[in-house]
Image: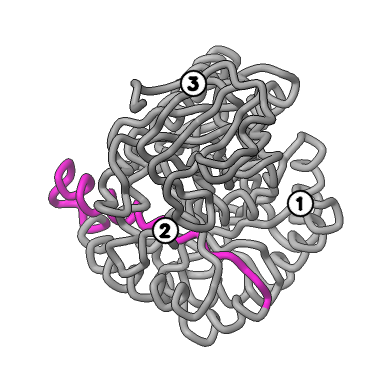
Amino acid sequence: MILFTAEELFDGVQRKFNQAFIVSDSKIVWQGDKDSIEIKNYNIEKTINLKFAMPGLIDCHVHITKIDGQSPYGAIEHAKATIASIENLKELRSEGVVACRDLGCADSLSIGISKAQKEGYLQDFPTLISSGAAIAATGGHGTNISYFSDGPDEVTKNCRKLILEGADVIKVMMSGGVNSPGQEPGPPELEQEEINAAVIQAHARGRKVAVHAHGNTAIRRSVIAGVDSIEHGVFNSEDIIDMMLEKDITLVPTLSAPYYATIEGIRQEPDNPDHKKSKEIVDRHNKITLLAFNKGVKLCAGSDAGAPFDPYNKVSFELVLLNSIGIPVEDVLKIATYNGAELLGLNNLGQIKAGNEASFIALENSPFNDINEICNKKQVWIKGVKVEGGNYE
């Protein structure tokens, strides 16, 4: 058994000082004050002293196979994409991510990786929750990573197909992107009856529904249907936020997506009008996200890593962005740990407490003093094994 002491600990819910926890194999078996006499009841073989510790990060929106230019794979490309995806998972791990949710890939490739992990492979990698391909309208958003579904019957069939393939969650492309042509920004691409069908099929089989929705109409239809999470939500509105709160629907704002589309997109393609439009929506996205938080809507952290210009090795910057719009550090850390575990159904993660998996990170300096510390080099432990980082002992 290993005794970890921490000068400062965020346990997934609150900040504490002078704490300790005991790890046996892959599990946390005890947590409390570091001076507790209860520690004597355990056979401690080693003590590691940490400055700051917290649960590992949970990224609720990634694309581990990348989505830029992706299309159905041949056998050779499939093997290549699988290896690249594992390398991308490794980059996420270096960022302190101990679990992630892949929301859309060609050929449902990520389902195969998730299945392999469930069978015992990649145990020192982040736990992978996968949607496989998304559900989308023919010619709609996410063409290269989706199953085309027109009408409730096709939505029903493809949801069942994805669940048969092994999808952990159903991803629905409810709207276009912020730059898609239409009568409103992020125009709706599926009808009310179509998203209703997806929710019915997913919930009947114990799966949650995550919805790509930028535009107001698309968000409204999704909330009426009773989806589990709204991804992005740029053109949300206060009345819909109230509905989300009433129905306990989570928001995964992915602030990184427009941020990188703006910063990196303009740098690499300065004359591209889409990137300039992304810059225009950043302020609106920030304000509506903060309003949702202030009204009590549950938020989770999602980087959208793998989307164009959105890197895997900077996903922790999503926490900096969440804090920059006015969300307190303690809440940001909860959003990125406890809330994420709850949304993904990973009840053994997200908190440093007895009975949970020993998947956590250590930092040399506290993010409570400067949130940017969360972006620095981390010591990462997955299932009781140190997999990344130096010694902060």
SS at circle 3? strand
Q: Counting residues from the N terminus, which is met first, the one under dot 3 or under dot 1?
A: 1
Q: In front here: 337 or 307?
A: 337
Please provide the residue range marked out in magenta: 247-274
Position in image of residue 333 (x %, y %): 44, 54
Name the disc covering residue 66, or none.
none
Q: Counting residues from the N terminus, which is met first, the one under dot 2 or under dot 3?
A: 2
Q: Residue furthest bottom?
A: 239
Circle 3 residue: 386
Relative side of 195 to 309, left or right:
right
Disc 2 versus disc 3: nearer the observer:
3
Relative side of 19 to 181, left or right:
right
Type of amino acid at the residue the image marks with label 2: Val
Q: Residue furthest right?
A: 204
Type of amino acid at the residue the image marks with label 1: Arg
Q: CA distance from mark 2 to mark 3?
A: 24 Å
Circle 2 residue: 332
Crowding at dot 1, Cα within 10 Å, few <14 / some 14-19 / many 20+, comes out as some
Task: Tell me if residue 383 comes above or below residue 153 in the rendering.
Answer: above
Position in image of residue 150 (x %, y %): 69, 58
Is residue 261 part of the magenta span, yes or no?
yes
Q: Residue at x 46, y 49 (%)?
A: 10
- Quarter holding the C terminus is top left
Circle 1 residue: 207
